[in-house]
């Protein structure tokens, strides 16, 4: 079974903490994505990466950074967590080929207090 | 830029009712279209897709037809079950090559099916 695995299902962090969300895929996919999901807003793209060490900003990159040192792993970093970053975070991966589906992790629900 | 608009929810139906969730899109080029489903407490999973005009995607009794003339990809099911209760997302993939096949999502429609 193909898999995208996020390191935590639930996280509670304090304001100002540095937070790492990890995502690993076992499908040898080139593209990886981080989204956040909020009620009424759907999924919004934070960052994506199309190759190792490559990254591109999505629609809402402010307050976030990413790291992709290995093809299978894509990390989302909140440099200084704030309460407005409380959300569900979803990681996804796809191949370069057109028309292919994205595979999603199970999500990490982050609460910043 | 690309965008996807889907009907606002929540939608509540009785078991065995007919379901339609409307989805329209704006895109340059020739996108692929997808419906994803998110069951409670889980990530998204692909429900069905269509890659060119007039294609029909189908899975688990759900269907959607890629209509280029109306830029639509409405999701339908003839008889819903309680187990279909979930959030449904319409999405498109930009195949122009400029966006590395990013997915653009609608805001999601929550469906509740009552016995």
Image (tube, coloured by chain):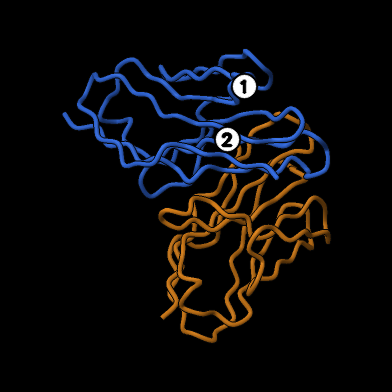
Chain colours: A orange, B blue
Determine the image quadrant of residue B39.
top left
Q: Quadrant of the N terminus of chain A?
A: top right
In the rendered structure, find residue B5 and report the number of the disc placed on it.
none
Report if the CB atoms under discs 2 and 1 are less than 8 Å apart: no
At label 1, counting other C-alpha atoms closer than 10 Å, the crowd grade (few under 14, some 14-19, many 20 or more) is many
Q: Residue at x 30, y 36 (%)?
A: B11
Determine the image quadrant of residue A75.
bottom right
Horizontally, is B23 left or right of A100 in the view? Answer: left
Disc 1 chain ID: B
Percent coordinates x, y for residue A38 in the rendering: 45, 58
Could you tell me which secondary element the residue under label 1 belongs to? Answer: strand
Determine whether B62 is above or below A10 in the image. Answer: above
**Is disc 2 in the same subunit as disc 1?**
no
Could you tell me which secondary element the residue under label 2 belongs to? Answer: loop
The residues tagged by marks 2 and 1 sit, at their Cα atoms, a distance apart of 23 Å
Q: Residue at x 57, y 54 (%)?
A: A44
Percent coordinates x, y for residue B44 in the rendering: 50, 42
> Looking at this view, is B45 or B14 the one in front?
B14
Determine whether B68 is above or below B31 in the image. Answer: above
In the rendered structure, find residue A1 and report the number of the disc placed on it.
2
Determine whether A36 is above or below A28 in the image. Answer: below
At label 2, counting other C-alpha atoms closer than 10 Å, the crowd grade (few under 14, some 14-19, many 20 or more) is few
Q: Residue at x 55, y 61 (%)?
A: A7
Q: Residue at x 59, y 47 (%)?
A: A4
Q: In front: mark 2 or mark 1?
A: 1
Horizontally, is B42 left or right of A3 in the view? Answer: left
Disc 2 chain ID: A
Furthest-bottom residue in this view: A16
> Looking at this view, is B11 or A35 the one in front?
B11
What residue would you read off at disc 1?
B50
């Amino acid at each position: 079974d193909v898999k995208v695995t996020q390191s935590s299902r639930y996280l509670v962090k304090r304001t100002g903490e540095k937070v790492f969300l990890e995502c690993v895929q076992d499908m040898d996919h080139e593209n990886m994505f981080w989204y956040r999901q909020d009620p009424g807003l759907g999924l919004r793209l934070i960052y994506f990466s199309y190759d190792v060490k490559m990254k591109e900003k999505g629609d809402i990159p402010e307050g976030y950074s990413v790291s992709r040192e290995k093809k299978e792993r894509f990390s989302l970093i909140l440099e200084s967590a704030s309460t407005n970053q409380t959300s569900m975070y979803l990681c996804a991966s796809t191949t370069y080929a057109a028309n292919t589906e994205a595979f999603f992790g199970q999500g990490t629900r982050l609460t910043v207090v | 830029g690309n965008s996807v608009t889907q009907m606002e929810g929540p939608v509540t139906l009785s078991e065995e009712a007919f379901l339609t969730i409307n989805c329209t899109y704006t895109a340059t080029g020739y996108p692929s279209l997808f419906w994803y489903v998110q069951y409670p407490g889980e990530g998204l999973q692909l429900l069905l897709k269509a890659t060119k005009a007039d294609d029909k995607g189908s899975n688990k009794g759900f269907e959607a037809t890629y209509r280029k003339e109306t830029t639509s990809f409405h999701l339908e099911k003839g008889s819903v079950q309680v187990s279909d209760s979930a959030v449904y997302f319409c999405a498109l993939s930009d195949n122009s090559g400029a966006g590395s096949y990013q997915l653009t999502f609608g805001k999601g429609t929550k469906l509740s099916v009552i016995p």
